[in-house]
Amino acid sequence: MTERLSEAQLDRAAALLRDGALVAFPTETVYGLGGDATNDRTVAAIFAAKGRPTFNPLIVHVTDLATAEKLADFDGRARDLARRFWPGPLTLVLKRSDDCPISRLASAGLETVALRAPAHPLAQTLLHAAGRPLAAPSANRSGHVSPTTADHVLDELGGRIAAILDGGPCRVGIESTVIDLSEPTPAILRPGGVTREQLEAALGRLAQTGNSGTPRSPGMLERHYAPARPLRLAATTVTPDEALLAFGAPLTGAAATVNLSPTRDVTEAAANLFAALRELDQPRFKAIAVMPIPESGLGAAINDRLRRAARGRAN
Ligand code: TXA
Ligand code: MG
């Protein structure tokens, strides 16, 4: 049985984590499936609970920059980004420090580690109480949509983890931006809660990535974020057997409609995206038609998730 813990029971969650158990917890982006990042058996259990391929490394969560600097080699750029965006939805991929105590399995055998200080107050309190870095991928089964409520987590992982700390719905709703700073040229491996525009204000112009060479993020290979229903993107019409994921003034004639943001606010749309996909992913619909969403701000991360979900169905 998976215990559902309230904020008042946070000490219980921390004790379970210190014992090596798996505890899902809220972050400002999505819920994470947490475990002691320094414990190999715990990290192995995270992969097993998610059904995640062990070549896909995990994000390690820390309270702050000072803690992170013991785990990885920070240069001026990395420190600058951490000072600007932590705590917050930015993950830094850096070279592991010489005496890095993080399980090698969390790095999936790479010489790098992905680090993030989350902004959610419960995540911060939990990290302090647990007293160790927490490996935490999104708390969904591998290949499924990330969870933004405790109920989503229980639907996916109930019975497979010791507990979930319930912090209500996640504020940002889309995963963190992952940026690789382990090589001379920084590369955005995954668009997310911190926008390219915000990163370029700090680092200068960033090259577009993703169409050539070896992928620097193993997770980019995975069929990700896919609902079971096919997704039809950039829909300008909708049929009566389709569900509609609307943005702005909705198209008419769909079997059911969820509107990500009636006022065309991409930040609001990001917060609603994963819950909306879950709600519309029902066998009675032939497909989910998705209205066009602008690429600006968090729109880039939303469209990245939608394109992967659509591609996932094609093969
Ligand atoms: O917002 C988030 O980032 C959430 C919350 C819980 O913090 N976590 C999350 O974790 O989305 P996950 O495991 O679902 O996604 C981590 C991504 C994957 O695409 C993985 O391949 C990449 O980060 N990643 C992790 N470590 C890496 C590394 N050392 N090098 C390259 N990519 C890495
Ligand atoms: Mg994930």
Image (tube, rainbow, N blue to C red):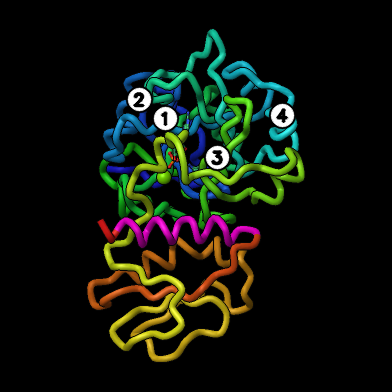
Residue 151 shows up from this direction? no
Dot 1 and dot 2 residues touching (CB under 8 Å): yes
Left or right of residue 287, residue 182 in this image: right
Residue type highlighted by circle 4: Arg
Q: Is residue 305 magenta?
A: yes
- Taking the view exactly as shown, the residue that stands out farthest to the top is 99
The residue singled out by tag 2 in the image is 42
Give the secondary structure at mark 1. strand
**Distance from label 1 to label 4 (Cα)?**
29 Å
The residue singled out by tag 3 in the image is 178
Dot 1 and dot 4 residues touching (CB under 8 Å): no
Viewer-proximal residue, 92 or 313?
A: 313
Q: Is residue 57 magenta?
A: no
User: Of the residues under marks 3 and 4, which one precedes in the sequence?
Assistant: 4
What segment carries the magenta color? 297-312
Determine which of the numbered discs, if any, sits on residue 165 in the image. Answer: none
Give the secondary structure at mark 3. strand
Dot 2 and dot 4 residues touching (CB under 8 Å): no
User: Of the residues under marks 1 and 4, which one precedes in the sequence?
Assistant: 1
